[in-house]
């Protein structure tokens, strides 16, 4: 019985972690991750999140413990630095939803498949 | 000095009132005829409503005189000012109307015929000066602006600082209005902007005005260039010129300063001996010839050129770039680079050398810290880079031996390959978010390129907020094809500078394009009306990310450092609720306006329609909702 309860709790946790709809709201509206990563998850000065190459654990680490700020540099001078988000500011459940949402975002087509870019590449 | 003015017992402020009264009296005297001319279809005369007889008129308003009334000033000093300004060959004068320069305004449009210069109606003084800023970046010489005493000057102050920090010449006149409105008056009018102008003067006579105007123009045009200001008392504008009309001096521009010949030779020795030289050019090319010279130097040395700000070097030249991954320069030549400190610090850390050639060292002042930090360089040559390049090229050519030539040729092959790889990488990156909605900036710029590449085009907006995609995808090789940024980073510059630059391009038949950030436009969107009113052919494509986006990101980082989360960082930084409909705004100002467009597939048809409008001589705006960066 205890095992079943634990399993149910885990499954409910997984189910919560797989709510990309909520993740979209969090990404675009509440935490505005789009600001640095683009609505596409891949345009902007922030890290390219699509295709998502991080495991869930690595993604959590990336958000909770990004690279430390450069010493003596103001926030204005750190446009390429991810700000840290603790679990207090961004709960695990919400972060899991964001992760799930990012994984739904479509990857970009390869440049070679885009005639216009091929044309530009061929220009002198 | 006042003796050159005819004596007049009237105060200048009275002159305008008397003129108005005189006009009213004339209208009364000529009443029936004027009324008849103005009415398209006169109603049949009613019995009892006959015009007054000549006798009745004489009794009511007096007998009209054939002599000019004694209060008329037939040749005010402002007419002479126009003569002087015409000697400067100024095309345009941008202004928001202000009573303190009303005399000059009236002379410009009536005595001067509103030609050379032609008056541009601006809705904000910041727009007027920023238009002049953009104009000068294309045309290489100043536009005149007129500013109202104290209030207009303070409105203009941010645009003046941008022009100052961008080393751009702007000629400004500010009125000082006697005692009429005390708040528009100042003991030292220029004081409030003196930190961000190169020179100012307050001439007290017409002869002094002529000399000051010519001198101001010369100072503005001498590198390092910058804005200059003349303060004009309204009395001087309004009082009669008198019989002794002052002479308008000749306009002889000061030659740009060239770097010391010994120092230039030493720089050439360092560059020729270098194994991995790098040229960094920021505001080096003042003229089209500057690009030619820089190409010659780069090809002589087979050195890569890292271009920033304006067009100094062709974007697709094989030597364009920083030499590729792992290219650690042992000698870096900085040409008109505002802040060399970082380059110098990095060079010292690896025992490399830095040479700077810049006119910046010839002119240092100001409370405003725009001149760059201290740079610990090996050779600091005070002089205009473009003026110094011919001597540097000659010195390099004389020092190059056959062995060095072979080494340079090998280096050139490697650099060309590095350039090819960098370009291929940019093409790969341009595919990112290709189908995304809102539209990615790489997609926007890529889609625009085939529509303009066969036109004589000019990008009149900054690339800093759009990922420098034009530089990465387009072939930029002419000086007017990109005008760079604000100078001091002051927002509100973009839209009016684009209009000013497009005005300069109009004479040459060029297609001007601005990829316009939304936050910048919202400072003073009235410039769109100015563009429509003056038929300035400008294609404005909104980069509408619905935010002061830099500040969204900044606040998120700040909140992260405070440990308070980023879920409230939209407060005070975003432009939503309601979203601004820029196409409707544009149409309201009289422009062709389309949008908002979020689907990238809709870009090309909208661009085509707008380009057709612009090619007919009108401005157009396409609102594109974009990825933030």
Image (tube, rainbow, N blue to C red):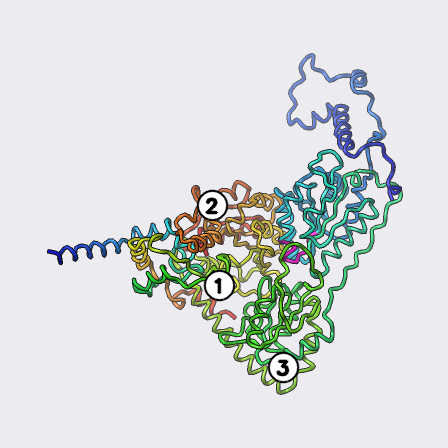
Q: Is residue B150 left or right of residue A112?
A: right
Mark 3–mark 1 Cα distance, whole angstroms, equals: 37 Å
Q: Residues within 10 Å of mark 3 (few under 14, many from 20)?
A: some
Q: In the displayed image of the protein, which residue is found farthest to the left?
A: A1
Q: Position of residue A104 (x, y in %)?
A: 30, 58
Which numbered disc, 3 or 2, marks the residue closer to the eye? 2
Q: Is residue B334 magenta?
A: no
Residue at the image position 74 percent from the left and 44 percent from the top:
B188
Say whether disc 3 or disc 2 marks the residue closer to the N-terminus.
3
| Alpha carbon distance from label 3 to label 2 | 54 Å
Please determine whether, in this image, residue B285 is positioned above or below residue B30. below
From the image, tell me which residue sits under label 2.
B572
Q: Magenta region: which residues? A: B162-170
Query: Residue B484, located in which quarter of the rendered image?
Result: bottom right
Mark 1: give few (<14), some (14-19) or many (20+) Cα within 10 Å: few
Q: Secondary structure at mark 3?
A: helix
Q: Is residue B478 visible?
A: no
- Judging by the rendered image, the residue that carries numbered circle 1 is A71
Q: Nearer the viewer, mark 3 or mark 1?
A: 1
Question: Do circles 3 and 1 both sit on a common chain?
Answer: no
Question: Which quarter of the figure is the N terminus of chain A placed in?
Answer: bottom left
Residue B410 vs residue B325, the one in the foreground: B325
Residue B168 lies in the magenta stretch: yes
Q: Front-most of A41 and B37?
A: A41
Badge 3 and badge 2 both on one subunit: yes
Labels 3 & 2 near each other (Cβ < 8 A):
no
Q: Residue at x 67, y 77 (%)?
A: B268
Given residues B396 and B336, the one toward you in this image is B336
**Given the image, what chain letter belongs to the residue carrying mark 1?**
A
Give coordinates of residue B306: x percent, y percent: 57, 69
Kindly identify which residue carries mark 3. Answer: B273
Q: Horizontally, is B193 left or right of B15 in the view?
A: left
């Amino acid at each position: 019985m205890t095992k079943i309860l634990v399993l149910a709790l885990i499954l409910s946790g997984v189910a919560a972690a797989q709510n990309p709809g909520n993740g979209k709201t969090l990404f675009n509206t509440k935490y505005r991750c789009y600001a640095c990563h683009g609505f596409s998850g891949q345009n902007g000065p922030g890290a390219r999140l699509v295709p998502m190459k991080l495991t869930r654990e690595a993604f959590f680490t990336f958000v909770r413990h990004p690279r430390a700020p450069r010493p003596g540099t103001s926030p204005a001078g750190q446009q390429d630095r991810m700000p840290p988000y603790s679990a207090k500011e961004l709960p695990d459940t919400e972060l899991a939803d964001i992760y799930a949402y990012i994984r739904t975002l479509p990857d970009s087509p390869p440049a070679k498949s885009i005639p216009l870019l091929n044309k530009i590449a061929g220009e002198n | 000095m006042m003796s050159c003015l005819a004596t007049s017992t009237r105060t200048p402020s009275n002159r305008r009132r008397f003129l108005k009264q005189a006009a009213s009296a004339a209208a009364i005297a000529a009443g029936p005829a004027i009324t008849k001319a103005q009415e398209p279809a006169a109603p049949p005369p009613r019995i009892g409503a006959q015009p007054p007889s000549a006798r009745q008129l004489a009794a009511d308003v007096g007998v009209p005189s054939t002599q000019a009334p004694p209060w008329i000033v037939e040749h005010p000093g402002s007419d002479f000012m126009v003569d002087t300004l015409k000697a400067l060959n100024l095309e345009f004068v941008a202004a928001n109307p202000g009573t303190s320069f009303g005399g000059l305004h009236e002379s410009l449009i009536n005595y001067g015929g509103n030609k050379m210069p032609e008056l541009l109606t601006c809705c904000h003084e910041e727009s007027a000066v920023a238009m002049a800023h953009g104009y000068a970046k294309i045309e290489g010489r100043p536009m005149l602006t007129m500013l109202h005493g104290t209030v207009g000057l303070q409105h203009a102050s941010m645009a003046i600082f941008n022009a100052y920090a961008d080393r751009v010449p702007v000629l400004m006149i500010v009125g000082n209005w006697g005692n009429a409105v005390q708040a528009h008056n100042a003991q030292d009018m220029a004081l409030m902007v003196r930190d961000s102008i190169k020179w100012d003067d307050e001439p007290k006579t017409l002869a002094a005005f002529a000399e000051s105007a010519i001198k101001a123009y010369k100072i503005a045009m001498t590198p390092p260039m910058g804005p200059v200001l003349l303060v004009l008392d309204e009395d001087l504008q309004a009082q009669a010129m008198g019989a002794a009309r002052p002479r308008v001096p000749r306009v002889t521009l000061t030659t740009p300063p060239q770097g010391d010949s010994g120092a230039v030779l030493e720089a050439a020795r360092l560059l020729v001996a270098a194994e991995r030289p790098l040229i960094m050019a920021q505001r080096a090319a003042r003229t089209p010839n500057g690009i030619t010279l820089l190409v010659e130097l780069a090809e002589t040395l087979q050195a890569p050129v890292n271009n920033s700000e304006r067009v100094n070097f062709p974007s697709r030249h094989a030597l364009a770039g920083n030499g590729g991954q792992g290219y650690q320069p042992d000698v870096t030549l900085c040409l008109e680079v505002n802040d060399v400190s970082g380059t110098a610090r990095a060079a010292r850390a690896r025992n490399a050398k830095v040479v700077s050639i810049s006119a910046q060292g010839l002119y240092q002042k100001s409370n405003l810290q725009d001149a760059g930090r201290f740079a610990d360089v090996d050779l600091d040559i005070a002089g205009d880079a473009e003026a110094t390049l011919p001597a540097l090229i000659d010195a390099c050519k004389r020092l190059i031996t056959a062995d060095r030539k072979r080494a340079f040729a090998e280096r050139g092959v490697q650099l060309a390959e590095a350039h090819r790889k960098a370009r291929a990488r940019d093409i790969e990156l341009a595919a990112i978010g290709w189908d995304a909605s809102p539209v990615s900036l790489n997609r926007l710029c890529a889609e625009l390129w085939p529509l303009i590449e066969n036109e004589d085009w000019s990008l009149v907006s900054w690339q800093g907020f759009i990922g420098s995609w034009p530089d990465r995808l387009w072939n930029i090789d002419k000086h007017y094809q990109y005008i760079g940024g604000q100078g001091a980073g002051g927002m509100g510059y973009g839209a009016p500078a684009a209009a000013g630059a497009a005005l300069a391009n109009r004479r040459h038949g060029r297609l001007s394009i601005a990829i316009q950030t939304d936050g910048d436009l919202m400072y003073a969107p009235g410039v769109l009306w100015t563009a429509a009113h003056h038929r300035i052919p400008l294609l404005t494509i909104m980069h509408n990310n619905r935010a002061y986006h830099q500040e969204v990101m900044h606040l998120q980082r700040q909140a992260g450092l405070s440990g308070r989360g980023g879920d409230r960082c939209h407060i005070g930084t975003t432009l939503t609720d309601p979203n601004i409909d820029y196409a409707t705004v544009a149409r309201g100002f009289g422009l062709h306006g389309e949008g908002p467009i979020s689907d990238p597939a809709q870009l090309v048809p909208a661009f085509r329609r707008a380009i057709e409008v612009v090619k007919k001589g009108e401005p157009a705006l396409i609102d594109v909702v974009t990825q933030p960066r």
